Amino acid sequence: MPDTAATSTSALKGETHVHEPDRIAGAIARRAAEIRATVPDLELGIDVDAEPALALAGAEGYSLTAILVHAAATALRELPWSNAAYRDGRFERYERVNVGVVVTTEAALIVPAVLDADAKSMSELTEELEHLAARARSGELTPPEQAGTTFTLSDFTALAAHRITPMITAPQAAALTAGAIRREPVVAADGRVVAGRVMTLTLACDHRILFGARAARLLARIAELVQEPNR
């Protein structure tokens, strides 16, 4: 937790405790400020029917995060301008699809890398994600296990917020968050309005490389794969 702390007193605010951020928290703060100041971002959101993904997870024992990673990785492979970066005035397109998945700990947000995520089955992704998350939370994750990501996913489906703006990890072209699953009326295939469960996917893109139609196609394809995860 904090390395050092100081205390002061104010009549209006009461006793104030001033804490110095530790190394990780300080690095996150500096990086976030740098990204917000230098990356012209574009944000898009879409509501998707979560029932098919939840049913598949329940039937096969996959994690919902694995289903989201599988959908994102497949879309990135199909749309190579999404698996890319803007760096020093040039575009970089990556051959390997490596999805970083945010793990929340008490001290920080840690992003282990799932290398070649597009080549792995949902069962393989489920096992690997569980392993990486456990290592992240125990502080055992090594720097190489966090390197090489080409896209970042935050699975916040267990939280209360529906729409959460992703933070792009520069120089990556995009990042995705999945918000809380909520109950809402949905229109079934036969036109009936039925009770359903919905999640919001929010995509943030570096507008210098993933703009307009490219960004919309990426989000639409991820949404399609989440709603039809067996395809």
Image (cartoon, rainbow, N blue to C red):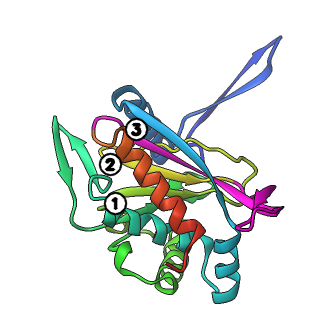
- Please state which of the two labelled residues, at mark 3 or mark 2, is closer to the viewer: 2
> Do callouts 2 and 1 mark residues in contact (Cβ within 8 Å)?
yes
Few, some or many residues within 10 Å of mark 1 (<14, 14–19, 20+): many
Residue to which mark 1 is pinned:
149
In the foreground, 38 or 57 = 57
Q: Which residues are magenta?
A: 180-208
Give the label on residue 31, or none: 3
Instruction: Answer above or below: position of 136 versus 163.
Output: below
Q: CA distance from mark 3 to mark 2?
A: 13 Å
Answer whether labels 3 and 2 touch (C-beta < 8 Å).
no
Residue 40 at x, y = what percent?
37, 30
- Dot 3 or dot 1: first in sequence order is 3
Q: Badge 3, how many Cα within 10 Å: few under 14, some, many 20+?
A: some
Residue type at mark 2?
A: Gln
* Nearer the observer, 160 or 45: 45
Residue 175's label in the rendered image is: none
Q: Earlier in the sequence, mark 2 or mark 1?
A: 1
Secondary structure of the residue carrying numbered label 1: loop
Closer to the camera in the image, 12 or 221? 221
Residue 172: mark: 2
